[in-house]
């Protein structure tokens, strides 16, 4: 992993390596135009490396002759599925705040072996091994193992990626409305993952990758303000609402100007 929260794209890079294609997570992100994409699903918003669905992986894969295949497998059937599979990406509950994408490599000594993608200087296991009981404790009632297969190169489905400006407009309105009156600390905390993470984690990373220091530095300042505001000892909200609006408008323009999937 060469940047934060990139485990899924790092897994994808590792799957491509088995086809003798040598790329990194950031190569996939930048080539696919992911920094300029934004997505809404139900009441949740996604940016950057959190765009972890087939439609976004295929933006990179389809033009170079691969397709991202996702299966739906029940918890009761996961053991049977893995018995006959290998080199599939699976999200396991290995983090306190969500899933971590790993690659299933097979069975050894009656244990399921998973390759662990990680930062180069991270002190973590290269491989996880789990008994069936341990594995079942790490998955939901349904899991979605995925793999890639070769196809004739084709243009990807860009329908959702083309809607990025529309999705971001909805997001911008909702986030701005929170600050129409002074928000309570509990609101800032409860909306951390849904509303603040896309901006202060994912777009922060994306603007660094694409070398937009002008926006990145503003987001860094905004992130510091947010972190101060949610501290237990903080008595009042410290976020500069004008800076927030400026960041949102800058990203809005960035998406409109650079998203290659918008119908123009």
Image (spheres, grey):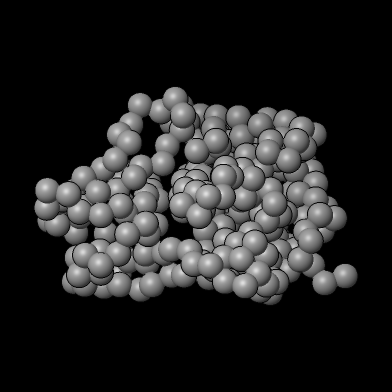
State the residue lying farthest toward the front: 20
Residue 94 rendering spot, x and y as whole percentages? 30, 46
Instruction: Depth check: give the residue in front, 4 or 46.
Output: 4
Instruction: Depth check: give the residue in front, 138 or 171.
Output: 138
State the residue lying farthest toward the right: 264
Residue 119 rendering spot, x and y as whole percentages? 46, 33
Residue 253 rendering spot, x and y as whole percentages? 83, 53
Instruction: Depth check: give the residue in front, 70 or 17.
Output: 17
In the depicted structure, whether residue 183 falls above or below residue 220: below
In the depicted structure, whether residue 178 falls above or below residue 216: below
Q: Tell me, yes or no, if residue 234 can be seen here.
A: yes
**Picture residue at 68% right of the left edge, 56% below the top:** 32
As drawn, is 187 to the left or to the right of 130? right
- Tally the marks: 0
As drawn, is 54 to the left or to the right of 116? right
Residue 248 rendering spot, x and y as whole percentages? 74, 49
**Picture residue at 62% right of the left edge, 50% below the top:** 28
In the depicted structure, whether residue 158 falls above or below residue 258: below
Quarter-of-image position of residue 169? bottom right
Instruction: Depth check: give the residue in front, 64 or 243.
Output: 64
As drawn, is 108 to the left or to the right of 209? left
Quadrant in the picture for the C terminus: bottom right
**Picture residue at 37% right of the left edge, 64% below the top:** 145
């Amino acid at each position: 992993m060469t940047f934060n929260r990139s485990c899924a794209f790092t897994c994808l890079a590792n799957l491509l390596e088995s086809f003798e294609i040598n790329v990194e997570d950031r190569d996939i992100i930048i080539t696919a135009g992911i920094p300029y994409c934004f997505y809404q699903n139900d009441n949740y918003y996604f940016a950057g490396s959190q765009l972890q669905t087939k439609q976004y992986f295929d933006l990179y894969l389809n033009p170079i002759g691969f397709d991202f295949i996702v299966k739906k497998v029940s918890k009761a059937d996961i053991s049977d599925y893995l018995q006959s599979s290998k080199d599939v990406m699976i999200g396991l509950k290995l983090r306190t705040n969500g899933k971590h994408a790993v690659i299933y490599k097979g069975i050894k000594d009656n244990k399921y072996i998973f390759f662990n993608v990680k930062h180069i200087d991270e002190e973590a296991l290269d491989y996880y091994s789990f008994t069936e009981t341990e594995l079942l404790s790490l998955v939901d009632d349904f899991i979605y193992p995925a793999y890639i297969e070769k196809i004739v190169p084709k243009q990807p489905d860009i329908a959702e990626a083309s809607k990025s400006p529309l999705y971001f407009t909805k997001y911008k309105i909702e986030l701005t409305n929170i600050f129409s009156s002074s928000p309570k600390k509990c609101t800032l905390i409860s909306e951390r993952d849904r509303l603040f993470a896309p901006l202060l984690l994912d777009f922060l990373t994306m603007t660094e990758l694409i070398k937009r220091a002008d926006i990145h530095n503003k987001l860094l300042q905004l992130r510091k303000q947010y972190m101060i505001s949610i501290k237990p000892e903080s008595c009042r909200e410290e976020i500069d609402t004008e800076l927030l609006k400026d960041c949102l408008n800058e990203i809005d323009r960035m998406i409109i100007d650079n998203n290659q999937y918008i119908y123009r």
